């Protein structure tokens, strides 16, 4: 017996959990650049999940990392085109 799922016309599937995390963390960093430990605390995801999400944002070119006073600080990169719309 086949497993068939039906989707109502006009409904959207939710984005994957990893995309939702990237969106949330990127918005946090856009509001206020912060250091790694504070981001772990703010998200409540734990160090591994927060680190993985930050890595994805860095690879995507949305976030940059700087080391200051022994801490890793993350900031959102500025768009070169003021009319460019973010995909996040």
Image (cartoon, rainbow, N blue to C red):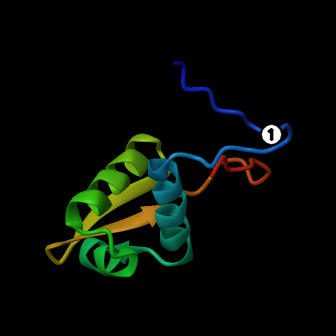
Residue under the point 52% across and 18% down: 1
Q: Is residue 63 left or right of residue 88?
A: left
Q: Is residue 68 left or right of residue 45?
A: left
Q: Locate residue 25, reporting x and y percent.
A: 46, 65
What residue sits right under mark 1 in the picture?
Answer: 8
Tell me if mark 1 has few (under 14), some (14-19) or many (20+) residues whose alpha carbon lies within 10 angstroms of its own.
few
Residue under the point 53% across and 56% down: 20
Seen from the viewer's position, the closer of residues 80 and 73 is 73
Q: Locate residue 31, reporting x and y percent.
A: 56, 76
Residue under the point 38% across and 46% down: 56
Seen from the viewer's position, the closer of residues 16 and 65 is 16
Q: Residue furthest front?
A: 1
Seen from the viewer's position, the closer of residues 41 and 34 is 41
Rendering quarter of residue 75: bottom left
Secondary element type, mark 1: loop
Q: Is residue 6 left or right of residue 8?
A: left
Rendering quarter of residue 5: top right
Seen from the viewer's position, the closer of residues 69 and 88 is 88
Residue under the point 37% across and 76% down: 34
| Residue 19 vertical position relative to residue 46 in the rendered view, above or below | above
Q: Residue furthest left?
A: 70
Q: Is residue 45 left or right of residue 9?
A: left
| Residue 6 vertical position relative to residue 86 in the rendered view, above or below | above
Q: Locate residue 63, reporting x and y percent.
A: 44, 55
Q: How many marks?
A: 1
Q: Residue furthest top?
A: 1
């Amino acid at each position: 017996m086949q497993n068939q799922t039906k989707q109502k016309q006009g409904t959207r599937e939710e984005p994957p959990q990893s995309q939702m995390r990237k969106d949330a963390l990127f918005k946090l960093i856009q509001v206020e650049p912060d250091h790694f430990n504070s981001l772990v605390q703010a998200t409540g995801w734990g160090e591994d999940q927060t680190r993985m999400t930050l890595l994805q944002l860095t690879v995507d070119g949305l976030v940059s990392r700087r080391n200051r006073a022994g801490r890793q600080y993350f900031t959102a990169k500025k768009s070169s085109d003021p009319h460019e719309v973010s995909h996040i």
